[in-house]
Image (spheres, rainbow, N blue to C red):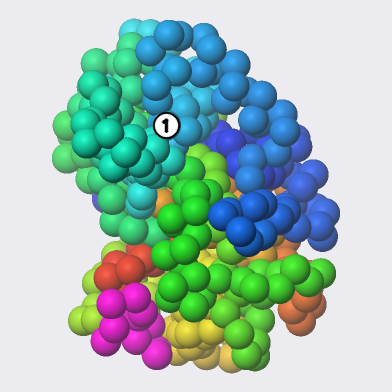
């Protein structure tokens, strides 16, 4: 990187909890966060917010009359953003930009408003302003009383890491000194589940480990949806309170072979990882947090891309989707949070049903991957502060 970009805080709300202590304790456990929920006439596995986090969102919704009409995806982003800004020490005078994206946006609210329309032939007054994609960053800006630029986008499942890329670009361009970036997703709806089932990628069995992310020999798709938001604070320059620095960024898009898949060798990942790693010797990479959603082709193609780059000397490999499922647009930043926690505690968190990987050196450099429909991969190389 031409200049230092510091991550000075990160906060999240997810099935793992909403504070660093609880989240880390849950990572140390080999228990997953999946429960069965009824959708129509079927029970489906999902990873929903834990009870204390649900209470946080409930109280937030009650705190402002305007918040009663907002989708959970917006409230998740507000809750995580408040905590991130507080942890970074940004006060009301701090000028910062906001880029918080979502793959699906206001899913629950959009479906609710559409049902009303089908029944009555009329749309409710707030149907449009509360379901636009820009709804998330604009409400976060309102809640934090910020005055900087507000950006929202959807780049499917790599949305949060694309937000980080965008924040880095603004900082390096000298157009801002601070940026709040991340992703938020509340996709646990009947229609969203049905879409994943239609692609035949959703887990069907409630086993000990129903999501087999990083099991490269599985014979069935095992993706499960989760929900949550993860937001981090970026600042340009060396900062005393830095958790880590962004050492490299990579991104790539490949020619689609199919509407929903990346190539068998994950060319987009090879390109994004090589771009992120161009200034670091491969042997210095300690851990890779894989995208690995739990699908046969998705997991294996990413693994092949990693093998193509690192050969037989692979870094430690992990993912959190076996535990919290795929949170779509928020997943990349939840991967960043996992990376930062492993750096902080100097403890590698592996996947319990895969081959044991022994940590032989301190965790100082972690590569985080994300990719979405359209083959739009992002890789972020983090260096411990």
Q: Is 258 one of the magenta-colored residues? A: yes
Counting from the top left corner in percent of width and height, residue 14 is at: 61, 42
Q: Is residue 214 visible?
A: yes
Please name whichever residue, 159 or 341, is drawn nearer the observer in this view of the structure. 159
On screen, 332 above or below 178?
Answer: below
- Left or right placement of residue 30 versus residue 348 in this view: right
Please name whichever residue, 184 or 34, is drawn nearer the observer in this view of the structure. 34
Counting from the top left corner in percent of width and height, residue 381 is at: 45, 59
Q: Main secondary structure of the magenta part?
A: loop
Which residue lies at the image location 59% right of the left edge and 91% below the top edge? 312
Residue located farthest toward the front when viewing the structure as drawn: 120
The residue segment tinted magenta is 257-267
Which residue lies at the image location 34% right of the left edge and 58% below the top edge? 156
Counting from the top left corner in percent of width and height, residue 184 is at: 44, 41
Q: Quadrant of residue 32?
A: bottom right
Which residue is identified by label 1? 71
């Amino acid at each position: 990187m031409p200049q230092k970009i510091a991550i000075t805080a990160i906060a999240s709300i997810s099935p793992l909890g909403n504070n660093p202590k609880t989240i880390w304790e849950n990572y140390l456990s080999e228990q997953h966060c999946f429960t069965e929920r009824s959708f129509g006439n079927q029970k489906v596995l999902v990873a929903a917010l834990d009870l204390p986090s649900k209470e946080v969102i409930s109280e937030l919704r009650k705190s402002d009359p305007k918040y009663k009409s907002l989708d959970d995806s917006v409230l998740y982003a507000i809750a995580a953003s408040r905590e991130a800004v507080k942890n970074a020490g940004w006060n009301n005078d701090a000028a910062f930009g906001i880029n918080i994206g979502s793959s699906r946006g206001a899913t629950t609210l959009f479906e609710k408003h559409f049902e009303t329309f089908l029944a009555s032939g009329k749309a409710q007054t707030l149907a449009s302003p509360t379901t636009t994609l820009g709804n998330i960053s604009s409400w976060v800006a309102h809640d934090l009383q910020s005055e900087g630029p507000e950006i929202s986008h959807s780049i499917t499942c790599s949305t949060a890491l694309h937000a980080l890329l965008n924040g880095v670009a603004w900082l390096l361009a000298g157009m801002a000194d601070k940026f709040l970036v991340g992703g938020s997703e509340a996709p646990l709806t009947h229609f969203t589940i049905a879409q994943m089932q239609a692609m035949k990628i959703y887990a069907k069995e409630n086993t000990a480990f129903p999501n087999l992310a990083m099991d490269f020999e599985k014979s069935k798709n095992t993706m499960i949806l989760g929900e949550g938001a993860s937001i981090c604070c970026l600042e340009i320059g060396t900062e005393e309170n830095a958790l880590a620095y962004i050492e490299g960024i990579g991104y790539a898009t490949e020619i689609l072979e199919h509407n929903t898949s990346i190539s068998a060798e994950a060319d987009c990942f090879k390109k994004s990882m090589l771009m992120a790693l161009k200034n670091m010797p491969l042997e210095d990479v300690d851990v890779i947090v894989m995208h690995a959603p739990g699908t046969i082709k998705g997991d294996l193609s990413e693994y092949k891309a990693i093998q193509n780059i690192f050969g037989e000397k692979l870094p430690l490999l992990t993912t959190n989707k076996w535990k919290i499922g795929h949170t779509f647009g928020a997943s990349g930043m939840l991967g960043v949070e996992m990376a930062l926690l492993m750096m902080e505690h100097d403890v590698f968190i592996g996947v319990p049903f895969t081959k044991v990987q022994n940590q032989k050196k301190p965790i100082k450099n972690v590569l985080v991957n994300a990719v979405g429909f359209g083959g739009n991969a992002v890789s972020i190389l983090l260096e411990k502060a």
